[in-house]
Amino acid sequence: MLNTNRHHHPVNEETPPVRERLYRRERQSVPAAREFARQALSDWAVPAPPHDDILLCVSELTTNALLHGVPPGRGFRLRLLPGRDTLRVEVHDSGPGTPSPTTPTDESGRGLLLVTALSAKWGVGQRDPGKYVWCEFTY
């Protein structure tokens, strides 16, 4: 019998492989990315909280990449990096700039406020060209 930790993951169970996919600069990429993430979460048996929060953050980060970070002719990459009791979501794009949350009274741009509220932590990393925005969840 395998030993288990408090989250019912077998101790000697390997971490699932990273899943990633490239998306074009087009509207239907956001629901496609969300469905890709939904399938991965289902395959990995990610529990209810934070399942829906993760999907909402995938939608927000991919929408931000599409609207603000993907120059014409380019795309973005969604990476899902599972850990034993964590999941990291990364959205890579080739656009300039560093995103930051708005205030609750702003009329638009509240996506990163949601990411801040729902995830354990988030941040921005630099790449050449562009950046990646990430958030992490624990369960």
Image (tube, grey):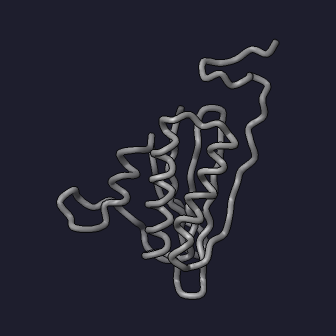
Quadrant including the N terminus: top right
Q: Quadrant of residue 84?
A: top right
Q: Which residue is situated farthest in the top direction here?
A: 1
Question: Residue furthest toward the left?
Answer: 105
Q: Where residue 9 sits: x, y (%)? A: 68, 25
Q: Name the one closer to the observer, 7 or 133.
A: 7
How many badges with numbers are in the image?
Answer: 0
Q: Left or right of 105: which side holds 22?
A: right
The image shows residue 57, relative to residue 136, as above or below, that is below
- Judge from the rendering whether residue 109 lies leftward or rightward of residue 59; answer left or right: left
Q: Residue at x 37, y 57 (%)?
A: 112
Residues 78 and 44: in front is 44
- Among the 4 quarters of the image, the one containing residue 20: bottom right
Horizontal and vertical percent position of residue 59: 48, 60
Give percent across and percent down for residue 123: 46, 54
Q: Residue at x 63, y 57 (%)?
A: 36
Left or right of 115, for residue 47: right
Residue lying furthest right: 1
Residue at left 40%, top 65%?
99
